[in-house]
Structure formats: structure tokens, C-alpha cells
Image (cartoon, rainbow, N blue to C red):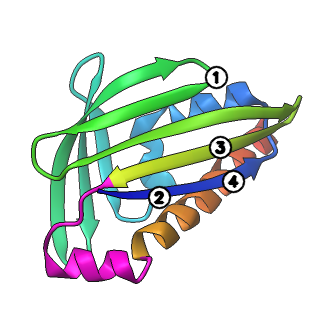
Amino acid sequence: MEHIERAVEVAVPVEMAYHHWNRFEAFPSFMAGIESVRWLDDSRLHWVARIGEQRREWVTQITDMVPQQRIAWQSEGGEEHAGLVTFQPLGPNRTRVVVQLMYEPEGLVETIGDMLGVVGRRVETDLLCFKDFVEGRAREI
């Protein structure tokens, strides 16, 4: 299983960073390839993404959620992946967001992409897009 860890500092309070990350339905606004995310029940989410030319769907289970601190998830069936995002206050208007992603590449294309660091770069880019997204929301307020 592969492991990726990336972080970004955002110029918003920890409560705001957590709140906007916890709005999973908004993920298409800052995550490339994500077409939709919707709640199935109190702890399960249905995801739809376009990865290259392929459309993929999967379900994740929220396994741990501590407000203003962390959210952990695990996939159900299909592609095997899990993750954890933590929110570390660095001051009244600054938060470090750390994403840890564990996944099993499937097939030759994903294995080669993994060896080339494609997933790690995607996580970095998505975190920078989240930074722009959440800091833009703070400016609106």
C-alpha cells in the first residue's frame, strides 16, 4: 500500500478550515477530477470522479471525526484507499492542513503513475486549490 503525506498552511482559523473541508459536497470546487460527492447516510459518502478517460465511483466510510481536529475515512469495496486529514491551529487566523493518503494502485497505468509521483502532485495541487478556496471564503465574510 502506498502512503502520501502533504500539507498546506491556510490563512483562516482552524474552525473555518475544518468547516469547509467537512462540506464534502463542495469538493468539486477545489479537487480536480471530482465530479460529485454526496452523503448516503450519517457516515458514508458516494464519490464520482473522472480519472483520465475513466469515470469512477466509490463509497467511503468516515471512520473518525473530531471537530476542528481530524477526519479519517476508509473505502468500502472496490479500490482500496484510506486517509486522514488533520487541522493544526498555528494562530488565531492560521491553520496547517495535513492530508495522509494510503492507497493501492490498480493496474499498470496506476502503478506507473504512482512511480512517477502523479498522485502526490495531485494531492499537493488540490491542497493549494483548497487554500485558495477557503481563503476566498474568508475574504467574502
Q: Residue at x 56, y 67 (%)?
A: 125
Q: Which residue is mark 1?
A: 68
Nearest-to-viewer mark from 4 and 2: 2
Q: CA distance from mark 4 to mark 2?
A: 14 Å
Q: Residue at x 72, y 33 (%)?
A: 88
Is residue 7 shown left or right of residue 28? right
Q: Which residue is mark 2?
A: 4
State whether residue 52 appears in this view. Answer: no
Occupied quadrant, residue 103: bottom left
Q: Residues within 10 Å of mark 4 (few under 14, many from 20)?
A: some
Q: Which residues are magenta?
A: 103-117
Q: Is residue 39 above or below residue 8?
A: above
Image coordinates of residue 136 in percent, x first then y, are 72, 49
Q: Residues within 10 Å of mark 1 (few under 14, many from 20)?
A: some
> Which of disc 4 and disc 1 is earlier in sequence?
4
In this view, the residue in front, 96 or 133, is 96
Secondary-structure class at tag 2: strand
Query: Does 111 lie within the magenta span?
Result: yes
Q: Are marks 4 and 3 in contact (CB under 8 Å)?
A: yes
The amino acid on which the numbered mark 1 sits, given as a three-letter code, is Gln
Secondary-structure class at tag 4: strand
Image coordinates of residue 7 in percent, x first then y, are 64, 53
Image coordinates of residue 41 in percent, x first then y, are 23, 19
Secondary-structure class at tag 3: strand
Mark seen at residue 15: none
Mark seen at residue 97: 3
Q: Is residue 45 above or below residue 10?
A: above
Q: Which residue is mark 4?
A: 8
Image quarter of the N terminus: bottom left
Is residue 44 shown left or right of residue 115? left
Q: CA distance from mark 1 to mark 2?
A: 22 Å
Q: Residue at x 24, y 74 (%)?
A: 110
